[in-house]
Image (tube, rainbow, N blue to C red):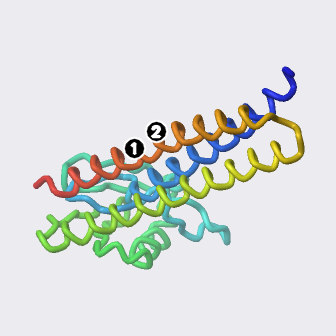
Amino acid sequence: MADEQISVEEILLESEDKMSKSLDHLKHELKGLRTGRASTALVENLTAEYYGASTPLNQLANLSAPEANLIVIKPFDTSCIKEIEKAIIAANLGLNPQNDGRIIRLAIPPLSGERRGQLANQVKQMAEQAKINIRNVRRDGNKSLDQAEKDKAITEDMRDSGKEEMDTITKKYVDKADEIAKAKTAEIMEK
């Protein structure tokens, strides 16, 4: 009987792990969205050519945001400054890099009200996609529970209580996705 309980627990744990990864992905996606405030997260995952290899910016340079509207990129090796500049332009962030030969400055212009609205909509869509992914994990987990019951690995009662627990876990992660989106939207809308 103890082995049978593990089966339900395994399904629930695996499902919760996948739901957690959906939230992590949402957070990662939202990091790259530009708000009115300078953040090194905007550029840290851009890649630039460095000795023939595509290398993330955070491995090529020291990134900082000394002011609310400025990102400073100081390459460890100044010979790659042109490549870093190209990567920033190619990323189409709407920012013009200012290069003085040693460091690159990115002035972050204030967002217009219309642009803030567009970004808030984008956040809403990203959160909705994360919630869809979470619900898909629930669906797959419930199918696994049904299959385990059909294969006589678990009882009908165990399946039903597993499904109830699955719904509880799903609600928790959907609520977290909403909280994350609400916080990011508030950050975008603040002037």
Tell me the CA gap for discs 2 and 1: 5 Å
The percent coordinates of residue 75 (x first, y second) are 45, 56
Q: Which residue is mark 2?
A: 172
User: Foreground: 57 or 122?
Assistant: 122
The residue depicted at 29 percent of the width and 56 percent of the height is 71
Q: Residues within 10 Å of mark 1 (few under 14, many from 20)?
A: few
Left or right: 104 in relation to 190: right
Mark 2–mark 1 contact, CB under 8 Å?
Answer: yes
Q: Nearer the viewer, residue 43 or 103?
A: 43
Looking at this view, is 96 or 26 the one in front?
Answer: 26
Which amino acid is tagged 2? Lys
Q: Is residue 178 above or below residue 92?
A: above
Give the quarter of the image for residue 191: bottom left
Q: Residue at x 81, y 50 (%)?
A: 147
Amino acid under label 1?
Asp
Q: Secondary structure at mark 2?
A: helix
Residue 131 pos. (x, y %): 47, 56
Q: Which residue is mark 1?
A: 175
